[in-house]
Structure formats: structure tokens, C-alpha cells
Amino acid sequence: MSATLDLELLRTFVAVVDHHSFAGAGAQLSRTQSSVTQHMQRLEQQAGVSLFQKQGRQKHLTEAGRQLLRHARQMLSLNDEALGSLHESSLSGVLRIGSPHDIADTILPPILSHIARSAPKLRLEIDVGRSPFLMEDLHRGKVDMVISTREDSALEGFALRTSPVWWICSAQYLHVPGEPIPLILVDEPSIYRRYVIEALERADIAWRQAYLASNLIGIKAATRAGLGVTARSMEMLGPDMRVLGEADGLPRLPDVTYHLWIRPNTVNPLTRRAYELIRASRGL
């Protein structure tokens, strides 16, 4: 007879990995460190393999531990969705979500899928646009929640993902070090425009504006046409593009963090419940 993995032990296991220590997992789960240790011992007994190996003063996952981690995340996600759907299936109405173009086919789809599975009667309306204008729409109540790289202390939110910002050009683009960088820029306001200009001026690298666009569609078109170099998060990179870096004489750029934002004083229970669903799916 095969053993059955205990979901409570798996949840503790994932917390240990995410917080890089037994003590950190205990703090998150409101358990003592000895209780977390006992959970991991019981889980290893159920799995029949060692999940951790000691390297110096640190404990790292074994290959079996890495395999179990993938399955544990899937099992916990399915469990939480199944329980959540029993409570959320009666939710109905309209939820308006704003998303920037560059993550509309990467970060956004899993979020929409999770909401749709948990609250199938909820109708989703998606507004894809530029971050600064979406944030303005959120403040005005034109959308209920927004994914954005912009910070706003007047809003309530949490981080979804941190992505590196890369120098991106066409796969056929010929980069000539020493010559002014032909930049493909989006018009103001733009965090990427600010990152690029500040980095180049700080490194004393000459540049010129080769192309100006009002949205990401124009940026992608100009980049694919080989008109110059742009800087965007890794989500924009396509098979017909390549990345330039420090080996090409270009400075490193800051990362960007995508947040999910809502108005803290929202009176729409659908917005608050959908927000909590997404937050819970991230283990927050």
C-alpha cells in the first residue's frame, strides 16, 4: 500500500524552501522551529527519501527534494483552488483589470485563469494599456485593479514578480561600440525611458533618439525593424531579438517589479475577494 503525503507537511516544506530556513517557515506558519523540524522528519518518512542535505551551516534540497517541491506546489495550489471554488463559485458581477502591454501574455494569463477557475460566474473585463495611465484609471475608479511597475503609497498592493531589464535589439542589428547608441524610446511618462537615459548619462555613453513611440506596439515594431536599441523587461524578448549587455559596452539596468494594486478604500466586495484570491495563490 502506497503512502499518502500530508498536505499540512507539504505546506510546511514549501514554507521552509521559500523562507530559506526552518525558523523563517515557523514564523510564517506560527509554529516553533522544533515543530517545523518534526514536520520535515515526518515528511521524509512519508516520502521515503531525504529531502535536505547539509552543506556547511546551510541545508539545501536534494534532487528528490527538488522533485517533491514541484509536486508540492501543484498539490497545494489544487487543494486551495478546490476549497476556494466552493466559497467563490457564487461570486458574480464584473471585475475590471488593467494590465500593461508587456506582460499581457505572460504575467496576466495565469492570474485571469486562477480567478476564472475560482469564481466562474465572475465576468472579467481587461484593459491593456500603459502603466501610468492605467494607474490614473485606478484612482478614478475606471478599473478595479491594475498590474503596474509604478509605486504608489496611496494604493494597496503586493509584488507579483521582479524582472530584469535588458538592452534589446533585433537579431540582425549590428551594434557598433563607441558610436552614439540609437535609442528606441517611448514618450513620457516611462520608467524604462528614465532608466535608460540615467544609466547612459551616468556611464558617460553618447546616445541619440532614433525612434519615438507612444506604446509598446511601436517599440516592438521599431526594434524588429533594426532601427536601434531599446530597454524593456525580459517579457518583451522575442525569438527575432537579442540582448546586449556589459560585454557590448552597455551599463547594467535596474530590475523592475510588477505589483498588483487596488484602492485601499474600495467598496466593491468582488474586487477585494479577487485581490485576496490572487494574493493567497502567491502564498502571501
Image (cartoon, helix red, strand yellow):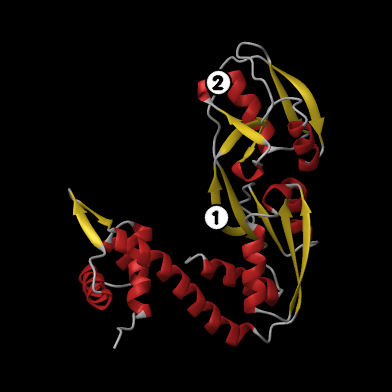
Does residue 273 appear in this view? yes
* Above/below status of 1 relative to 112: below
**Mark seen at residue 248:** 2
> Residue 204, percent across and down?
58, 14
Q: Work out how far the residue at label 1 is from the one at label 2, CA to CA, in angstroms.
A: 32 Å
Q: Nearer the viewer, residue 173 or 112?
A: 173
x, y percentage for residue 95? 74, 70
Query: Does the image show residue 24?
Result: no
**Mark 2 is on which residue type?**
Asp
Tell me which corner region of the image, top left, top right, bottom left or bottom right, holds residue 116. bottom right
Q: Residue furthest front?
A: 1
**Residue that appears at 65% across and 25% down:** 197
Instruction: Measuring from the top left, give residue 46's x and y in whole percent.
Output: 26, 78
Q: Quadrant of residue 178?
A: top right
Disc nearer the start of the sequence (1/2) = 1
Q: Can you say whether 251 is above or below 62 in the image?
A: above
Nearer the camera: disc 1 or disc 2? 2
Circles 1 and 2: CB distance less than 8 Å? no
Q: Secondary structure at mark 1?
A: strand
Amino acid type of the residue that numbered disc 1 sits on in the rendered structure: Ala
In the structure shown, which secondary structural element does the residue marked by tag 2 occupy? helix
Judge from the rendering whether residue 116 lies leftward or rightward of residue 28; answer left or right. right
Residue 79 or residue 126, whichever sits in front: 79
Vertical side of 183 occupied by 79: above or below: below
- From the viewer's perspective, tell me whether residue 55 is left or right of residue 235: left
- In the rendered view of the protein, which quadrant contains the N terminus? bottom left
Q: Position of residue 176 (x, y in %)?
A: 64, 15
For residue 159, the mark is 1
